[in-house]
Amino acid sequence: MIKKIEQIIEFLIWESRLVIFFAVIASVFSAIMLVAIGCYDVYLVAEEAFHAFQTKETYEAFHKDSLTHIISAIDSYLIATVLLIFGIGLYELFISKIERAERNNKSSKILVISTLDQLKDKLAKVIIMALIVTFFKYAVNFKYDSVQSLIYLGAGILMVSLALYFMGKGHESKIKDH
């Protein structure tokens, strides 16, 4: 009797991992929505491009707005990438390996995830890139009207550069370890 109860509890505990499937579906759906949002941003730029070259004033306004929309699109695509990698990683870690991804030699190895550390590393890289793009978007729209604001911009650029440098160093050390 106790052995049977233990088997039932173990079955329930093991099968409870399937609740992660809801997170997988939500992540993939969110990624699709963000790609659509990014494409809409690009569409807005393309639509405005036809009217932008009429006068110098309309071109300057278009240039600033288009840069913001394109950077927003890139940001949306990067966050969609994070969500897609996250969803696929959760699926592979908790539910089942995706055999098609492992069989397909042409597919990117970024989507094949076998450990939580691999998922974390892949997500961290894409998140850092998304943060850099967001910084760039705000840096483009910021008004630099004092020396202090330029110093802040320089400090921000230095921080971004250091983040990229250390991210590259971490990748180099992992390659040497393998």
Image (cartoon, grey):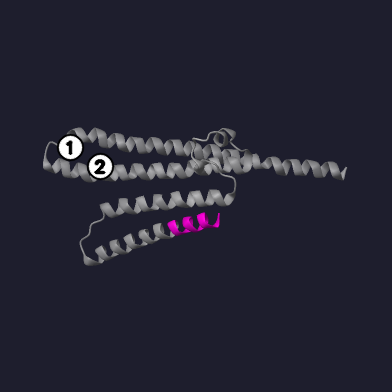
In the picture, the quarter occupied by the N terminus is top right
Q: Earlier in the sequence, mark 1 or mark 2?
A: 1
Pick the front one: 105 or 118: 105
Secondary structure category for the residue under label 1: helix
Which SS type dominates the magenta stretch?
Answer: helix
* Residue in view at x 61 percent, y 44 percent: 93
Q: Is residue 87 magenta?
A: no
| Quarter placement of the C terminus | bottom right
The percent coordinates of residue 138 (x first, y second) are 31, 53
Numbered badge on residue 74:
none
Give percent across and percent down for residue 50: 19, 32
Give the left or right position of residue 170, taking residue 136 as reference. right
Q: Label 1 vs label 2: CA separation?
A: 10 Å
Q: Are marks 1 and 2 in contact (CB under 8 Å)?
A: yes
Q: Disc 1 marks which residue? A: 52
Seen as rendered, the residue at the extreme left is 55
Q: Which residues are magenta?
A: 168-178
Q: Crowding at label 1, few (<14), some or many (≥20) Cα neighbours within 10 Å?
A: some
Could you tell whether 1 is left or right of 158 in the image? right
Instruction: Tell me the amino acid under the disc marked 1.
Output: Ala
Q: Is residue 173 magenta?
A: yes
Please give the residue where the numbered disc 2 appears in the rendered image: 66
